[in-house]
Amino acid sequence: MNEEDEELVARMRAGDEEAFVSLVARHHASMLRLANSFVSSRAVAEEVVQDTWMGVLRGLDGFAGRSSFKTWLLRILVNRARTTGMRERRSVAIGDAAPAVDASRFDASGAWSSPPQHWVEDSDDRLLAQSLAQRIEQGLAQLPERQREVVTMRDVDGLSSREVCEVLDISEANQRVLLHRGRSHLRQALEDAVSP
Amino acid sequence: MVTDYLEGALSRGQRKRLDAHLAGCEHCSEYLAQMRATIALTGRLRSEDFTPEMREEFGDIYRRWRAEED
């Protein structure tokens, strides 16, 4: 995948519009979603994505190939998205400091007093999967920004932990903490959806 | 801890202890399975379509840039 990016970049530098559009199309979904992590509206996210590509074209000479094209691209996106938007929260964000699993679910000896309700196999059922997907979208929107960024990049987009650290300029340990908290909130949201 | 486990960030000793615990604890195993399922579901969120309109917009952006360059 990485090689193809570099190949398209070379062609687009040489005047190939198709190559540019292919490159844009390839990264469109992940860029839009990531931009949406930072800004409040879809329209603004699309503008951020366009601005990013304009910045990419103008800054091409600055891409020395030290990182992969994708991480370079996403770094530009993250910088633009951050400066563009304070995200207006439509609902109350969950605090960063909340424990991954509520303490009241464990008894004094540390054992589960209120164990996780089973829902894993059911999640293969298509209708349920659709409603769970909606719940995850909602859950993502409610996460603190930094957790949302990491979960979006790792779990929605499938970037590696190293790539995420490069794009966001954070340490591996920091990334893991954010990932864990974000995933925990999502797991809880799904549990709440399945077992009211 | 669970995420460290999934990320391969635990030491061998820690991982062995966690595996041993999981073997005997259905609740924690359930929790781990749920985390995995959550991750899998998150990975299947619907992708954005790249429409012909978008193709045109970006074609424009590219052509304008080429014009700037010349």
Image (spheres, coloured by chain):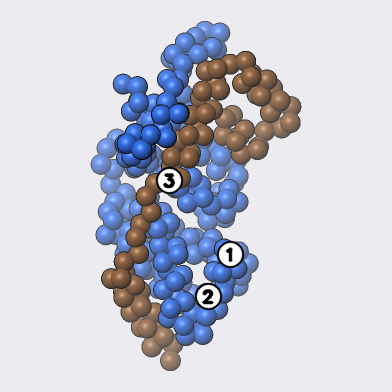
Name the chain under label 3. B
Q: Are marks 2 and 1 in contact (CB under 8 Å)?
A: no
Q: Is residue A19 left or right of residue A38?
A: right
Q: Is residue B43 above or below residue A99?
A: below
Name the chain under label 1. A
The residue that disc 1 covers is A2
Residue A163 location, x and y as percent?
A: 57, 54
- The amino acid marked with disc number 1 is Asn
Q: Name the mark nearer the viewer: 2 or 3.
A: 3
Residue A105 location, x and y as percent?
A: 45, 15
- For mark 2, give the secondary structure: helix
Rendered brown, the chain in question is B
Residue A23 location, x and y as percent?
A: 46, 70
The residue that disc 3 covers is B44
- Disc 3 residue crowd, few under 14, some 14–19, many 20+, Cα 10 Å: few
Task: Measure how far apart labels 2 and 3 are at the Cα level.
Answer: 28 Å
- The answer to which of B6 and A162 lies nearer the viewer is B6
- The quadrant of the image that shows the C terminus of chain A is top left
Q: Tell me, yes or no, whether dots 2 and 1 are on the same chain.
A: yes
- The quadrant of the image that shows the N terminus of chain A is bottom right
Q: How many marks?
A: 3
The answer to whether residue B64 shows anywhere in this view is yes
Q: Earlier in the sequence, mark 2 or mark 1?
A: 1
Residue A9: assigned label: 2
- The amino acid marked with disc number 3 is Arg
Rendered blue, the chain in question is A
Q: Residue at x 46, y 45 (%)?
A: B43
Residue A5 location, x and y as percent?
A: 54, 69
Task: Measure how far apart labels 2 and 1 are at the Cα level.
Answer: 11 Å
- List the single residue furthest toward the top: A108
